Image (spheres, coloured by chain):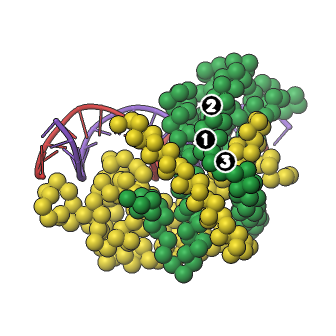
Chain colours: A yellow, B green, C purple, D red
Amino acid sequence: MSADTLDLEARAHSEHAQELRLWLRLLTCSQLIEKRVRTGLREQFDTTLPRFDLMAQLERHPEGLKMKELSHRLMVTGGNVTGITDQLVGEGLVERTEVDGDRRAFRVRLTPRGHTAFAEMALQHEQWIVQAFEGMSPRDLDQLHKLLGKVKQHQLDINQRLGAAAE
Amino acid sequence: MSADTLDLEARAHSEHAQELRLWLRLLTCSQLIEKRVRTGLREQFDTTLPRFDLMAQLERHPEGLKMKELSHRLMVTGGNVTGITDQLVGEGLVERTEVDGDRRAFRVRLTPRGHTAFAEMALQHEQWIVQAFEGMSPRDLDQLHKLLGKVKQHQLDINQRLGAAAE
DNA sequence: TATTGTTATACTCTATAACTATA
DNA sequence: TATAGTTATAGAGTATAACAATA
């Protein structure tokens, strides 16, 4: 049973086969890795990827982030950030603090307990990711990183164009 | 506002920074592209990515596919395939036909109308994907495809090991 | 008037497990 | 007993829109 009978790559068959095959392969890779990360987070830490991502953002910003900033960084709409934040506050992993000079907003930041809990998860997460890319040379990793950098920048450019056009 | 303040890449900061950054960049790329595809499918065709993927599989197999095969190829569990198939049957885009010699199973395949509808969507889908990678040289695309091929194969190997261990 | 954040709602996708019918 | 597929359920994740409070 060959690999190409098993997944989404079966989809490519047009004159722009190169781009299509690349996209489907990219999608398959990220789905395969993401699936293991989600399963691991659920089984070992009883949490989810969006919750992990939110905590990861806060860990990077000890001074805290406003809801709007979180929404932007996590690329989801505001209501969802409220929901996830409420959960984490309920578990004592995150807290809302006041913002001087703007009583509408507040900063969300990790509690000491949240910081500890995140460190533990991040360590395991790192192992999953290292495993996902093991067997590839540092040179391959670097090259892949650079090429994906071009792809990413192009998507951001497109989004900016679309965003500007919508205003 | 620089790109790295805007997305998940903010997460990488350990001694295995190379792998982590690569993973977060890979994830960001696929999320950005996938988001546009999902939005486009919804806005222009009132459909979803899983539905599109199911039809794409059927388009590749005019003789039809069994539910179990679809489940395997789409990497989701059986109950979900039933649900999506039911929707598409309800809209006359797909049909269930009998399988000789096994009255438990049947083949799912595109109706003529489903075939036409898919062709239209696939054309637009192709344009989104071509746009997503425009600006990259054929050589870059090829290299990216090869590198991701290694990544993909490694994930499949891991899954096989895990699957074998679970039996 | 615009912005920050919340609430309410609805829908899609997903996994799990119990179930039916057939092999 | 095992397999193909369905049903039922629950939860995650998301977007949208209406809303309150503040700027």
Whether residues under marks 3 and 2 lie with C-beta atoms below 8 angstroms apart, the answer is no
Percent coordinates x, y for residue A5 in the rendering: 80, 46
At label 3, which amino acid type do we have?
Trp
Q: For the residues carrying marks 3 and 1, which lies nearer the camera in this image?
A: 1
Q: Which residue is mark 2?
A: B124
Q: Residue at x 55, y 33 (%)?
A: B41
Q: Which residue has dot 3 on it?
A: A23
Disc number at residue A158?
none
Q: Is the same chain shared between marks 2 and 1?
A: yes
Kindly identify the amino acid type of the residue bearing the numbered disc 1: Gln
Q: Amino acid at mark 2?
A: Gln
Residue C23, quarter of picture: top right
Residue B91 against residue A101 in the figure, above or below: above
- Percent x, y of residue A38: 54, 60
Marks 3 and 1 close (CB-CB < 8 Å): no
Q: The C terminus of chain B is located in which quarter?
A: bottom right
Q: Nearer the viewer, residue A73 or B114?
A: A73
Residue at 50% in and 37% down: B39
Residue occupying image coordinates x 63% and y 73%: A130
Could you tell me if residue B161 is visible in this image?
yes
Element marked by disc 3:
helix
Q: Secondary structure at mark 2?
A: helix
User: Could you tell me residue A82's position as x and y percent?
Assistant: 31, 53
